[in-house]
Image: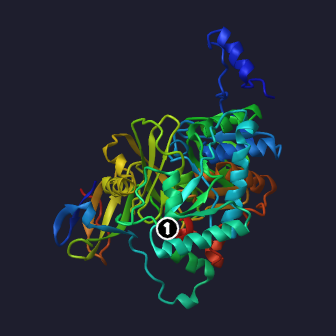
Amino acid sequence: MLQIECPWCGPRDQDEFQCGGEAHIVRPAAPEALSDAEWADYLFNRANTKGAHAEQWCHSGGCRRWFNVVRDTVSYKILSVYHVGDSPPQENP
Amino acid sequence: MKKNRYSIFSLARNAVSYHRDWRAAWRSPDPAASYDVIVVGGGGHGLATAYYLAAEHKVGRIAVLEKGWIGGGNTGRNTTIVRSNYLWDESAHLYEKSLQLWEGLSQELNFNVMFSQRGVMNLGHSLQDMRDIYRRSNANRLNGIDSEILNPAQIKAMVPAMNVSANARYPVLGASFQARGGVARHDAVAWGFARAADEHGVDIIQNCEVTGICKENGVVTGVETNRGMIQASKVAVVAAGHSSVLGDMAGLRMPIESHPLQALVSEPLKPVLDTVVMSNAVHGYVSQSDKGELVIGAGIDAYIGYGQRGSFSIIEGNVAAIVELFPIFSRVRMLRQWGGIVDVCPDACPIISKTSLKGLYFNCGWGTGGFKATPGSGWVFAHTVAHDEPHALNAAFNMERFTTGALIDEHGAAGVAH
């Protein structure tokens, strides 16, 4: 089980959260200008990283706010938690 | 080539020598410098691919590279259910081909894969469930696939342990039943294909991890491994949960996410359940193995995970559903619980396809339901690799469908419980 540090509510059990998949996928500004391949890449292709992976979580059983998490997808260890719109923090010194 | 044929006579002959002289089921050769085809991944699908490449397409030199050991990945981690009752024509035809291969597999491989056609029951718990079941069942019959609809009394007669009372939290309103479905011994499938492929001259190389895919001018030339570079004119990747990792090596972005999928088995019990029961709505599926263990499958975690383990809450919800359906299982003790990594496509259908790199082929995206397709998947993928063209059965399962939009949306029909 994961213990996830909600930026607003503090550390809570994983059951209170829902995972929203890969973070930092930006909807193209002008979809009509894209080729089919570029649109498919936005819609379907995913990094599916083995290792440090930036993903969205929602505290759906709590404050219901979204935030981002960098998590190791092998050990499942949460490496950092940060606000939506921010860049992932650099590695801890 | 069947030098090591298993039969009642070879059993008797070896009994005389106290079973000390059985030969290894397959060789463990060192990798050669080059092959015609390298299959990356020694799971059931990869071994089946190598077997059909050698046996049906007479491809000369074939190697299967497995980073772990044969039978140690998803082939030995699934809940062994085999069925072909898929809604859409493309999937129905593919899985039905596979089911037909299952029906003759023990004979073909000279290895008892313990394929037991004890039937697969898919429960409906709501009016909408039942409408979907009627639709799928009718679609199956139009495709020549056996399917029946059962009412609660018929279900109770077949599975007395199930609670079909109208007072259940999710009452059982009916089910579809595919009598030709069932279970198979998953390790035996891996071992049987490995042994049969080896007999046809395939080199099975375990503990050999692919670390890079070599290419020149858009053409594949071989793979880098922890045992050195191995040349090949064709590389067929069947890497399940690690498909994206292999895709990265080739510079391909994949429409795949890898999730943990869990299962558990109980202590062995006397016979109590002689068919396979699945429920998409409460999300549980259960059968009883020949050893007597209840084999229970859970769902995937929503997060990406390569760790071969999942969240306890998934198991908790799954077991709650099973106990609701089978109240007498409430005091059964669980023996083992484990996870595997499943590669899930957005439309819950596999990719069995050529790629933009010449000589590179991918067979992936089977998600939570690849075991049932093991022989069929290998059969169509071998055809695709040997002829550099997909077979009619897997033409729709190409990688371009995510660009063209011709998805095969099995998510609603079959994507939850496998």
* Left or right for B159, reference B145: left
Res. B221 in view? no
Residue A23 position (above or below residue B64): below
* Left or right for A52, reference B119: left
Q: Name the residue at 57% across, 41% down.
A: B186
Position of the C terminus of chain A by quadrant: bottom left
Seen as rendered, the residue at the extreme top is B17
The percent position of residue B12, horizontal first and vertical second, equals 70, 15
The percent position of residue B290, horizontal first and vertical second, equals 53, 36
Instruction: Quadrant for residue B267, please give it.
Output: top left
- Tell me which amino acid carries mark 1: Arg
Position of the N terminus of chain A by quadrant: bottom left
Q: Secondary structure at mark 1?
A: loop
Applied colour scheme: rainbow
Q: Nearer the viewer, residue B191 or B417?
A: B417
Residue at image mark 1? A46
* Left or right for B82, reference B245: right
Q: Name the residue at 81% across, 29% down.
A: B1
The percent position of residue B353, horizontal first and vertical second, equals 69, 61
Total number of numbered labels?
1
Please rate how many residues cluster around mark 1, counting C-alpha atoms within 10 Å: few if below 14, some from 14 to 19, many from 20.
Answer: some
Q: Chain of mark 1?
A: A
Residue A79 position (above or below residue B222): below
Instruction: Quadrant for residue B362, please give it.
Output: bottom right
